[in-house]
Structures are given as C-alpha cells and as structure tokens.
C-alpha cells in the first residue's frame, strides 16, 4: 500500500496511476455505480473524489503519441517536470488513471493506494501566468459626475433602435412566409 498526502489547496499537481486489470474489468472498476459504489475511490482510499475530473486512459487509444507527451499537452505539464520519469511513463501499457488537482475538490486527504492501482508519479503543472499591471492612461481618468445621464440616454436609444430593427425583421419574415 502506498500513501500519498493530497494538499487541498494544491492547484497544480497531477497524479498518475497504473491500473492493473484486464480490459473488460476496467469500466466496472473506474465508473461510479448507480448505487454510489465506486471501486476506484475505494482503491485510492480517497475520502473525496470528483468523477468529472477522473480520466481513465487506454494507452492504445493514444496511438503513436507517448503518454508523457499526452500528459504535457493535456495537463500542461512541462516536459522538464517529467524529466527522468519520461521513459518509465512511456513504457507503461494497458490502462492508467490520471487525477488532476480538481479531482480532489480542494479537500486535503491521505490516499491509501491499493491493488489494482499503483502510483506511477506526481508532477506539478506549469504555474499560471502572472497577471500584468493595470493599464494606465489619461483617457481612463475622469469624473463620474455629469455625463452619466447622456450616456444612459444613448444606451436607451441604442436598445430602442435594436428592438425596432428586430421587430421589423420579424414582420418581414412573417410577410415572406405567409
């Protein structure tokens, strides 16, 4: 059994697990039953897991694309982050389960990974780009007093003209249809 601590505030770590089951048993293990039973959740020992963010991949479906490339592109994992693990990742066969941070619904928990799952690795995605500084311009400066009424009247006129144009279009369509 492998233990993995999940930090609920982590928004960048992607976890990869190998699923050692015959192809015909994968769907039953990874899908949540109508009764709420979910073998994957139990196999991970997870307290909280969101089905919409769990991805099960049949590696044959990737065709010639290596799994490391798929992880880089689909989960924004820098190829540098995968580093020495690339060869090991690309050598996997069968099915894998990929869990991005959203799968844990911001819940801190300890996973107790059991058979038929085995933890392949966890990697951090590229950090979000920093927001740039606010644009500053003298045209953006000014007063909110005055001018507000005229801009509201202009907006009202635009709405009225648009409504009249749509009404005219509806009447034209009705005339052509009848």
Image: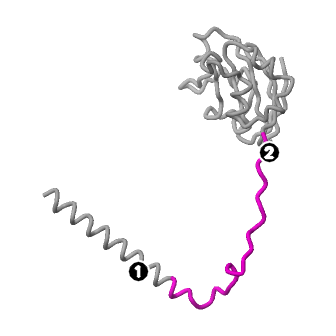
Looking at the image, how many numbered discs can be counted on the residues? 2
122 up-or-down from 157: above or below: above
26 up-or-down from 158: above or below: above
How crowded is the residue under tag 2: few (<14 C-alpha within 10 Å), some, or many (20+)?
few
Looking at the rendering, which quadrant does residue 177 occupy? bottom left
Q: CA distance from mark 1 to mark 2?
A: 46 Å
Q: Position of residue 83 (x, y in %)?
A: 85, 27
Residue nearest the observer in this picture, 63 or 159 = 63
Q: Is residue 176 left or right of residue 147?
A: left
Q: Which residues are magenta?
A: 126-151
Secondary structure predominantly adopted by residues drawn in magenta: loop
Q: Which mark is residue 127?
A: 2
Residue nearest the observer in this picture, 93 or 47 = 93
Q: Which mark is residue 10?
A: none
Asked whether residue 145 is drawn in magenta, I would say yes
Kindly identify which residue carries mark 1: 157
Q: Residue shown at 59%/27% (left/top)?
A: 36
Residue nearest the observer in this picture, 65 or 10 = 65
Q: Secondary structure at mark 1?
A: helix
Extreme residue in the right direction: 84
Asked whether residue 176 is drawn in magenta, I would say no
29 up-or-down from 136: above or below: above
């Amino acid at each position: 059994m492998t233990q993995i601590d999940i930090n609920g505030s982590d928004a960048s770590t992607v976890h990869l697990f190998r699923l050692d089951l015959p192809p015909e048993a994968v769907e039953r293990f990874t899908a949540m039953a109508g009764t709420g039973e979910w073998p994957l959740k139990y196999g991970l020992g997870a307290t909280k897991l969101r089905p919409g963010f769990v991805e099960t991949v049949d590696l044959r479906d990737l065709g010639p694309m290596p799994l490391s490339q798929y992880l880089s592109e689909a989960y924004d994992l820098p190829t540098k982050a995968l580093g020495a693990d690339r060869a090991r990742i690309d050598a996997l066969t069968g099915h894998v389960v990929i869990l991005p941070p959203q799968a844990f619904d911001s819940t801190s928990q300890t996973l107790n990974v059991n058979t038929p799952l085995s933890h392949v690795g966890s990697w951090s995605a590229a950090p979000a780009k920093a927001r740039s500084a606010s644009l500053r311009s003298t045209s953006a400066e000014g007063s909110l007093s005055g001018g507000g009424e005229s801009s509201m009247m202009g907006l009202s006129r635009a709405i009225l003209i648009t409504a009249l144009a749509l009404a005219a279009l509806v009447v034209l369509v009705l005339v052509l249809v009848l």
